[in-house]
Image: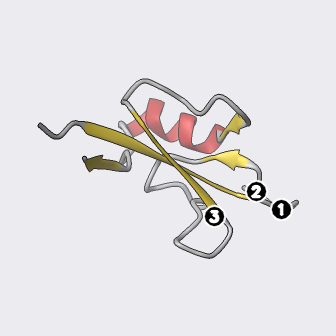
Amino acid sequence: MSGLVMEFRRRSGTGVGCDVWHWCRSCRHLPGDDPGVQVRRLEPGDVPEEGELCEECAALGERMGCGLILHGE
C-alpha cells in the first residue's frame, strides 16, 4: 500500500533562499529540478534532520495553508 510523503528541496549556495529546506509550492525561492538540488521525501510531519527550514514556507503555511509538495509512494 502506498503512503503519502512530503517533499523538501534545498539548493546549495549563498544566494537568497539557498541552504534552507523548502516545502511550499508557493514559495518564491523553491528550487526546481536543477542539477545539485537536494530532495528529501519524508512522512508528513517529519522534517530533514540537517539544515534549517525556510521562513517564507513557514509563514505561507501559517497564512494560507500552503501548497505542500506531496507524493504518493
Distance (Cα) linking label 3 and label 2: 10 Å
Give whichever of 7, 68 is nearer the camera.
Answer: 7
Q: Are marks 3 and 2 in contact (CB under 8 Å)?
A: no
**Gap between marks 2 and 1, in whole Å?**
5 Å
Q: Amino acid at mark 3?
A: Val
Which residue is identified by label 2? 18
SS type, badge 3: strand
Is the Cβ of the residue at disc 2 closer than 8 Å to that at disc 1? yes
Where in the figure is residue 33, as x and y percent of width and height?
Answer: 52, 72
Residue 36 placement: quadrant: bottom right
Q: Pick the residue in front: 48 or 64.
A: 48
**Dot 1 corresponds to which residue?**
13
Identify the colour scheme used.
secondary structure
What residue sits 61% from the left and 44% below the top?
56
Residue depicted at x 88% and y 60%: 14
Q: Which residue in the protein does label 3 denote?
A: 37
Q: Quadrant of residue 68?
A: top left
Q: Considering only order in the chain, which callout, 1 or 2, is on the residue closer to the N terminus?
A: 1
Give the answer, above or below, for where 15 lies relative to 59. Answer: below
Of labels 3 and 2, earlier in sequence is 2
Q: Is residue 1 above or below residue 17?
A: above
Residue at position x 72%, y 55% from top? Answer: 17
Rendered location of residue 37, percent (x, y): 63, 64
Residue 3, relative to residue 9: is it above or below?
Answer: above
